[in-house]
Amino acid sequence: MIDLLGYDFMQRALLAALVTGLAAPVIGTYLVQRRLALLGDGLGHVAVTGVALGLLTGIAPTWTAVVVAILGAVAIETIRDRGHTSGDLALALLFYGGLAGGVMITGLAGQSGATLQQYLFGSITSISRTDIWFTIALAFVILGLGLGLMPQLFTVAQDQDFAQVAGLNVRAYNLLVAVLAAVTVTVAMRTVGLLLVSALMIVPVATSQQLARSFRATIAGAVVVGAGAGVGGLLVSAYLSQSYGLTVQPGPAIVLLALACFVATWPLGVLLRRRQRRHAPFPDVEPDDHEVSGTHDHEHGPDCGHLAVPHGDHVDYVHDGHRHAPHGEHYDEH
Ligand SMILES: [Zn+2]
Ligand SMILES: [Zn+2]
Ligand SMILES: [Zn+2]
Ligand SMILES: [Zn+2]
């Protein structure tokens, strides 16, 4: 195992698994918040055509995949924005077209299905020196924008009408999340593959949500699970291959490890939720729309200047047309 870590290709693979595991759940958290958990999956299917175009033209498939995935993201966001009732259907058609088109173009390019399979299920141990820099650079763009714009992206994902009133360009931020999801798909393509990319964006978030009670904590937990599953899955697959001669693909190993984390934390989440209910002293004053507001720069208090409204067993503060109540480390929207 130690000898294996000495190899260049293994070090590159570990680096790729780490940065992918860090970046994918950040965008995944916004997708989950907006109930678009399967957007990454759809963009993965669209990106298959991008890879195939790369194989056909001789351009590096990472480049063609990122371009086609971004075009797909813009198309999806435009269809969604128009609010057609058939939006769902239009997306499905786009996804099938992406996958079928990709397989067909790969054949036309004279490449076998095995070549395409590297991109469908990942080929992390064959990442080249150029590819690793590409992966790291894109991961940093995702992390920088996803974490740096957290207040804006959170507000837009949480309540579009309120964000509009607050003067945020909702359409632009929605488009940014979709484009970042497309870039994430390309980054994760080499690690877990296009067909499993969505799992690395969503499963760590689902795991973190079992335990975290605020948005910020959810993102933090998801990143830890994502990075842990990325590195852990790669090491498990390398260990099993080296010591037992078993063929275990790193991509599926990473996804299964993330799923194992979810299964392990699930009973804990059930317990936590049950306990929280039992400890709530005044269940009748708990508002129906108990929405957690994760990002709040201002700390409310008796002297903060906002209108204070006694509400059940606590005090709400009114500002910008909504009511906030301090609750532990975060604010609730009442
Ligand atoms: Zn205040
Ligand atoms: Zn209240
Ligand atoms: Zn507030
Ligand atoms: Zn709360």
Image (cartoon, rainbow, N blue to C red):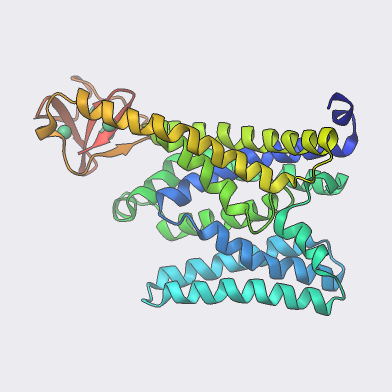
Figure quadrant of residue 289: top left
- Left/right of residue 160 with respect to residue 178 in the rendered view: left
Taking depth in this image into account, of 154 and 243 the one nearest to the observer is 243
Task: Report if residue 259 is visible in the image.
Answer: yes
Quarter residue 95 falls in: bottom right
* Residue drawn where x is 86% and y is 47% of the image: 128
Residue at position x 49%, y 41% from top?
205
Please provide percent x and percent y for residue 31. Answer: 47, 51
Q: Quadrant of residue 323?
A: top left
Of residues 334 and 275, the one drawn nearer to the viewer in this rendering = 275
Residue 262 lies, with reference to residue 126, above or below; the image says: above
User: Do we see residue 11 in this rendering?
Assistant: no
- Rendered-image quarter of ligand 1: top left
In the image: residue 41, left or right of residue 154: right
- Residue 317, image x, y percentages: 19, 31
Whole-percent x and y of residue 295? 38, 35
Marker count (numbered)? 0
User: With respect to residue 193, does 23 lie above or below?
Assistant: above
**Residue 294 as seen in the image, left or right of residue 8:** left
Q: Quadrant of the C terminus?
A: top left
The percent position of residue 198, horizontal first and vertical second, equals 57, 53
Q: Quadrant of the N terminus?
A: top right
Foreground of the two, 246 or 127: 246
Q: Residue at x 80, y 42 (%)?
A: 246
